[in-house]
Amino acid sequence: MAAQLPIPIYSSLEDAFGGLRTASGQSVRWANLAQEFKSRFGREPAYIARAPGRVNLIGDHIDYVLFGVLPAAVEHDILIACGPSMSPVSSNSGSVAAHNLDPRYVPQTFAPMLKSAPLPTASEERDAENTVHAESWHMDIDTKELRWESYVKAGYYGVLNHFFPAAAGSTTTGPHPVPVDLLVTGCVPAGSGLSSSAAMVVASTLAFLAVNNKVVGLTKGELVEMAMENEKRVGVNSGGMDQAASVICTPDTALYITFFPSLSAQPTPLPTSRTVPRAVFVCANSLVVSDKVVGAKTRYNLRVVETLVGARVLAHHIGVVLAPTERPTLREVLGRWLGFYEAKNVPSDLDTDMLREGVQKILPYVEKLRPTRDDGELGVTMEEMIEWSGMPEAEFRQVYLSWVDVEATHFQLYKRTKHVFEEALRVLRFRDVCFSSEAAILPRDTLIDLGALMNESHQSSIELCENSCPEVDELVRLAREAGAFGSRVTGAGWGGCTVSLVAEDMVDEFIRSMKSTYPPYKYLGDDELREVIFATKPSSGAFVLKL
Ligand code: NG1
Ligand code: MG
């Protein structure tokens, strides 16, 4: 199972990238980073941690309700050169000097502190009984303002609290984290839906693990869990797609990532390498920032709440009894409805036939969530939502609203729930087509089928998830006109990138056509254009290079 594999540690780029050709294309960038580290910190780095961004082919806004998704890692990645600090000023336990090659991001130094106040972790917030009272490590992370070093700090959290609990229990005993120097460089465009944030958090987690000698013995799945917890420190209640993709992806394949009942991942063949015409996925940046700081975070977290409340109301309609303090996801409610109460009896979502039947069976009940008022297009009001939940108001607010910042007057329980189940089915269909295309029967039809699923997915983004925007819709339309088999928004949305399925021999023409038709591309030079629209080749997941 891919998630159970150890985290790769390589001693050469040739090994890491599986061949001299890919490595030589990369080696200048890696050597420059190591050289610059040396000139800033006075010695060679001990490691370079690398984590890629990802493009989600299909399955958006369903990972946080624990349905499976289908991303692939992209070649764009974050690199962090790192090593134990030799500087006398950083002799504080675990202090960090964090530099970035991009001059816009100024160097930072910080040290974690020990705090004895109970510090619930993100998962413990879901389970208040488990609050930790021992001393734990703490760092100030500004969740209101986006700061580059916040992602570095977030990556450090899990490493400190998982591996140095003895130090946290006492300031004098137990091994302490070593002081670290690090230098970051990245080419995953920020705010583009290609998951630069997860790449940063994974690379940072991995860098701190490496310097503290904790990579050996850790599985990819464990790194994903740690990176997921860590990323929540930055303030988005995201699912685990981005971190899992960044860690577990393999070259030339997509990854079917499932979260229920626990994380699993299955490499999924793409028709790109096996069929004629060969197809590639082209990412095109709308150049509208997929805003995570103010707007999108609220919009994103709002969808998390809407789907959770949708799950409770649906449970009520289908006769699944929930305890008042529970907050199960739609996938968990489906699981209980199908008769699996005990984690040990739950079949994994890798059993796709069982999952497909379950989703098809529950979909008609989603109609019960339709607003009944004439102005129902707006969704339900707070009062209606509380009434539908069957819970006393104070209890409802405690369970569904107290842990997250959500400002809204109306809530779209019906649209979001319908999006989730239908998108989950599209992921399964896409995966089925990919596996059946291994036999390469009617390859062109294969691409037409995949494209149609992508188009349906985008329509659902427009109508049900409501996470698109006019510029993205325009890009999607132009992509289809330029010959894409299908095109959709990828990632959180409200801007960012689209992903389009294009025949390989059409890619140059496709990009030329997009340049001449999408207004923001018209005046870009060749280099700038390459940054905003590019064909992706599924890349390998995160690893450590030991120097
Ligand atoms: P982006 O914004 O593309 O990195 C976000 C979430 C994912 C997933 C997608 C929507 C974060 C870190 N990631 O991805 O978990 O929910 O939106 O499918 O917020
Ligand atoms: Mg992100």
Image (spheres, rainbow, N blue to C red):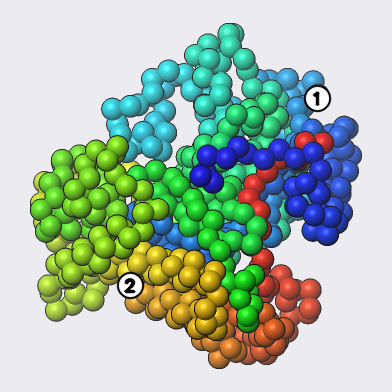
Q: Secondary structure at mark 1?
A: loop
Percent across and percent down for residue 525 are 78, 79
Q: Position of residue 277 (x, y in %)?
A: 63, 82
Q: Pick the residue in front: 273 or 52.
A: 273
* Amino acid at pointer 2: Leu
Q: Residue at x 86, y 34 (%)?
A: 44
Please report the residue visible at 39 percent of the width from the left and 65 percent of the height from the top: 428
Tag 2's secondary structure?
Answer: helix
Taking depth in this image into account, of 95 and 506 the one nearest to the observer is 506
Give me the residue at 42% from left, 33% from top.
121
Residue 164 vertical position relative to residue 45 in the rendered view, above or below? above
Instruction: Say above or below: 391 vs 440.
Output: above
Query: In the image, is residue 372 above or below residue 300?
Result: below
Circle number at residue 377: none
Q: Does residue 288 appear anywhere in the picture? A: no
Q: Is residue 265 left or right of residue 41?
A: left
Front-most of residues 373 and 353: 353
Q: Nearer the viewer, mark 2 or mark 1?
A: 2
Instruction: Calculate the distance from the C-alpha at mark 2 to the C-alpha at mark 1.
Output: 54 Å
Q: Amino acid at mark 1?
A: Ser
Q: Which mark is residue 464?
A: 2
Residue where numbered disc 1 is placed? 87
Residue 154 picture quarter: top right
User: Looking at the picture, how far across and down is residue 25, in whole percent?
Assistant: 83, 59
